[in-house]
Image: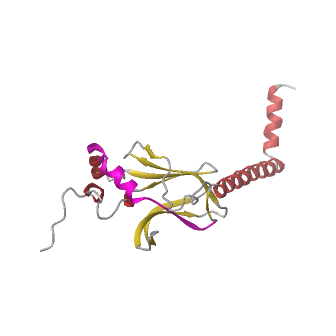
Amino acid sequence: MTLADVFAELMSLADSRAFEWAVSIIASSIVSALTALFVFWFRSREPLDGAIAWKWRQDPWGQDVEKPFLVVQNRSNMPAFIKNARLLKGNFIKREAKRYAFSYEEITDGNFPLEIAAQGISSFPLSVGQADYFLDRARWFNKIIGYVFKRPYLWVELMTISGRRLVVPANDSAGFQERPLWIDLRWLHPPKPQ
């Protein structure tokens, strides 16, 4: 049997109804397997969202004060566990400013891993003093980049046990009274009321 005969047999087989069925069965099984893998990958990753919010809390002396919190929403069906949270500084190239970003009043609170409930929201306290400290010591070019490109200078980075990394802009964790003007995208003080 020559190569031309083999090719003629394959062409006659390709024109048959059985070949069409076999190709459609193989193609549909490959597409369904790839779809199932994509759905499994999408559901197994941790869809986390975060933002800085302010809440009224009582300090240890009984005074009501407003404090910044990192609020993290977990949109998956599985709980997420934070294994690391650090404060970063820099507009485009971020460097570690502080190894531990949270500010708990009790020394025993805030031990890792911190749980974010499945389809829930968790909040973690931040320190106003840390944000003010790093924003006051920002260099002049960081201030200009932050003003011109509207890029935050402070960031909170969370790392989960599964390796998911969430970076949240944290300029809003600075105090309202002592907040630098360039954070609010102003260079001059607002006019005082008469």
Compare residues 160 and 151 and report the one nearer the observer.
160
Specify the quadrant of the image occupied by residue 10: top right
Q: How far across and how far down the image is residue 39, in percent?
A: 67, 57
Asked if 24 appears above or below 63 in the picture, the reply is: above
Placement of the C terminus among the 4 image quadrants: bottom left
- Give, as a single range, the part of the protein colored magenta: 118-142
In the image, taking residue 183 as reference, residue 72 lies left or right, namely right
Residue drawn 59% across and 68% down? Answer: 120
Identity of the residue furthest to the left in this view: 194
Q: Does the magenta run of residues contain 73?
A: no
Q: Position of residue 144 (x, y in %)?
A: 26, 47
Q: Measuring from the top left, give residue 179's x and y in whole percent.
A: 30, 59
Queried whether the magenta region covers residue 129, the answer comes back as yes
Q: Nearer the viewer, residue 122 or 23?
A: 122
Rendering coords of residue 183 (x, y %): 30, 56
> Which residue is depicted at the point 73% across and 54% down?
32
Most distant residue in the front direction = 61
Q: Is residue 77 above or below residue 92?
A: below
